[in-house]
Amino acid sequence: MSQMLNVTNPVNGKSLHSYPALDSASIDSTIERANSAFAQWRKTTFAERAAVLKKVAASLRDAKPALAKMMAEEMGKPIKEGLAEVEKAAWCSEYYAEHAEQYLGTETLPSDASSSTVYYQPLGTLLGILPWNAPLWLAARYFAPALMAGNTCVLKHDPNVPGCAQGIADAFKVAGVPDDILVNLPITTSLVSEAIRHPAIQAVSFTGSAKAGGIVAATAAGEIKHSVLELGGSDPLVVLADADLDTAADIATLSRTINAGQSCIAAKRIIVVDEVYDAFVEKLKTRLEKLKLGDPLLEDTDIGPIARDDLRQNLHRQVIETREAGAKCLLGGKMPEGEGFFYPVTLLTDVTATMCAFKEETFGPIMAVVKASDPEHALTLANDTEYGLGASVWTKDMRMAQHFAMELNAGQVAVNGIVKTDPRLPSGGIKKSGFGRELGPHGIKEFVNAKQIWIK
């Protein structure tokens, strides 16, 4: 009897549905389907691939209500956020359809040859190992550039969201695109290493925790296979004395509470200089206490449940340890009674660099506010982390902004704005936040052979 991927609805803690998981033989046959499709797909022109990706985008948009509902039911994303996520996935498909040929154009370089050129050719069949927190968007930023480069894609989602994964595969089928250029691989976590080691898999894209990323990277490296890792983050948002405090508070609130705070690039450590600390905390409190916690299927819900109860329990542990270490709790911080995996929006202030909510990544609607004595102290605090995904700084002084932008240890920095992922721009981290880049002209070149040809 085959194993099942059993999904629990985080709204009520009850069983939602089950999907059969593939066994070893089925893993092999599924990956071989994508590998067989590569032989023809690699020969297609950019224009032909673009037409396919545009059909996929249209199919995703047609399925938008169903896909957003599936996200709400499987992992608790508010319906209004789910609809926007599907739209972003469709946009990503269209963006690469329009720009891949430009990004992968043949380059001529000077040398001692009569002609020396670099061609960008596809690697083959890729494996995308994806998490539950943004199942449509994170899939699209993997498959759109990979397919436009001429690769074929195996899609392995977290066992928490098998319906979302199947929904993506169904959107490809409905679009009428070539068979098996993307295949869904519903497997248990225990069989992921087997998929990585499959001879047809040429490279791996992984998004998830630092711990799991280390295992994936080690497995891929053992097979001499390239990998790109987008891992956790503990992003700082620095507020200097001359910042537009109202706008900064709006963005800090949005960044910290999107998807109930379950985002790698959320602003997790709010670092505020002493001069404006009390005023900024009050602005944060005013905004956070207005947010509505509730059923993600309702359009007026701002904060849905945490995806799983074990994640909620860990979040509460982090809050308790931080409070016991001396932080103040101005909002939330109490485990709700009743069904489901809900956790209230929580505002922790006077957090210091030795406390749990500063040192660990918090994956939930927990805002930790830290006081800095001056801008340089704020910069030191911002860089005091084992992660390096995103960071932001708020100031009207552009010289100071440039100083922070250059000195913050992160893969991307936003000045007076939100840290976000965008098909037009590269995204990725340093340190324990991973390596390699996704998106932009840099991301599409991760999974190609930059072939140098020298002719005399």
Image (cartoon, rainbow, N blue to C red):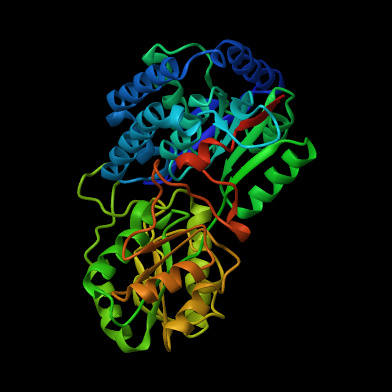
Vertical relation: 288 (above or below) 378: above
Residue drawn at the location 40% of the way across and 31% of the way down: 99
What is the number of callouts on the image? 0
- Quadrant of res 342: bottom left
**Horizontal placement of 161 versus 200: left or right?**
left
Tell me if residue 454 comes above or below residue 406 in the rendering. above
Front residue of 242 and 162:
242
Q: Is residue 163 visible?
A: no
The residue positioned 35% from the left and 45% from the top of the image is 77
Q: At 60% from the left edge and 25% from the top edge, which residue is drawn?
A: 121
Q: Residue furthest right?
A: 222
> Which residue is nearer to you in this view: 310 or 200?
200
Can residue 416 be seen here? The reply is: yes
Query: Which quadrant would the N terminus be assigned to in this image?
Result: top right
Please state the horizontal and vertical placement of residue 186, each as a whole percent of the image.
57, 28
Residue 27 on image: x %, y %: 66, 22
Expressed as whole percent of the image width and height from the top left, the position of residue 274 reads: 36, 88
Residue 176 locus on image (x, y percent):
40, 11
Quadrant where the C terminus is found in the figure: top right
Q: In this view of the protein, which residue sits in the foreground, 149 or 320? A: 149
Which residue is depicted at the point 52% across and 62% down? 410
